[in-house]
Image: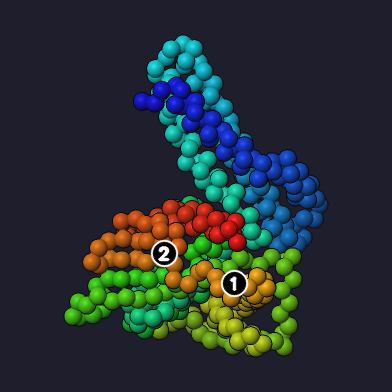
Amino acid sequence: MATPEELREALGQLAQTMASIEAVIDLPGQREAIAVLESQAAAPGLWDDQEHAQAVTSKLSRLQAEVDRVASLRQRLDDVGVLLDLAVEEDDPEAVAEAGQGLAAARPEVEALEIRTLLSGDYDDRDALVTIRSEAGGVDAADFAEMLFRMYLRWADRHGYAVDVMDTSYAEEAGLKSATFTVKAPFAYGSLSVEQGTHRLVRISPFDNQGRRQTSFAGVEVLPVTEEADHIDVPEADIRVDVFRSSGPGGQSVNTTDSAVRITHLPTGIVVTCQNEKSQLQNKAAALRVLQARLMERARQEKEAELRQLKGDGGNSWGSQMRSYVLHPYQMVKDLRTDYEVGNPAAVFDGDLDGFIDAGIRWRRQQSNAA
């Protein structure tokens, strides 16, 4: 058991971390923003514009939860300090042990909150639009894409995040050609953006009757969901809209009307589809949101490329092949940027991604600071 002196030192370090977190989060500023949103939420006629009302109430709920989380964690650390003082004063080993348990329980929450403060990008606090595509590797790649799709859905489920699946395109033999979905949670984009890049799977192929080892690849794209304030203009003349019948695995019809929508952005050649909503109108609206997100990301990348060219780094950036999942001849999942690795691929595929995401966020901040 840790001594009171050791607990005091550990508590002091966590308290210092909390002070840094509170400074970054700017609690007074957050409370002012909450007051403004509460005023807007109480305004008569708020729900005349449902989309605006949902945006106001959603942001208010998120800010309140954030402030409450910080305040609650600060109170817990203060309570541990009081308990530790009493334990020392009364020479009570049981109270010292209780203080140690409270400190151990608070530590991972403080560390998780610290990670949140590293998400300070322009769009980090938004929902995430994720697309997974099978790449090289044939049917194994399509199967791998479906494994990644399930992995991210399980990760979201572990955290209680809502997911809206917008499009799934199944491969002929097994797996997915692609899948697009939205993760609706505070800082979903900031967290999942470090997952963007090429994922690599090495295993004995279940589709090879000779039992040979197969390497396959799948790509993950993560975009911030657009909002009204983004002003991404998509003139009707710049798009071609095609409708078709939604289909499920193996071509089985899941919709007897032509409700699925494919939008082609003629100036850029970007193509998006949506087939998981109930009507053609809903699918078109969802596809337009995906197109706007991709156009916004394209503009951001072009701007970054110009800046990199001015800096003279040749335009190179991180993000291509970023993680390996090895199932044979040994068991390991390793991030190629951060060197973070685990020896339990089954747990990772079941959604245990937080260690990789946290390491990726810290790595990205280090890269940004070094630039």
Q: Nearer the viewer, mark 1 or mark 2?
A: 1
Residue 363 disc label: none
Query: Which image quadrant is residue 299 in?
Result: bottom right
Going from the N terminus, do you reach mark 1 or mark 2 first? Answer: 1
Query: Which image quadrant is residue 51 in?
Result: bottom right
Query: Which image quadrant is residue 371 in?
Result: bottom right
- Measuring 74% from the left and 65% from the top, which residue is drawn there? 229
Read off the residue under disc 1.
313
Amino acid type, label 2:
Leu
SS category of the residue bearing label 2: loop
Place of residue 15 in the rendered image (x, y in percent of width and height, measured from the top left): 56, 33
Disc 1 packing (10 Å; few <14; some 14–19; many ≥20)? few
Amino acid type, label 1:
Asp
- Measuring 57% from the left and 38% from the top, which residue is drawn there? 17
SS category of the residue bearing label 1: loop
Q: Is residue 282 visible?
A: no
**Residue 344 horizontal side relative to residue 46, left or right:** left
Residue 336 disc label: 2
Place of residue 226 in the rendered image (x, y in percent of width and height, measured from the top left): 66, 67
- Measuring 34% from the left and 55% from the top, which residue is drawn there? 342
Give the CA distance from mark 1 to mark 2.
21 Å
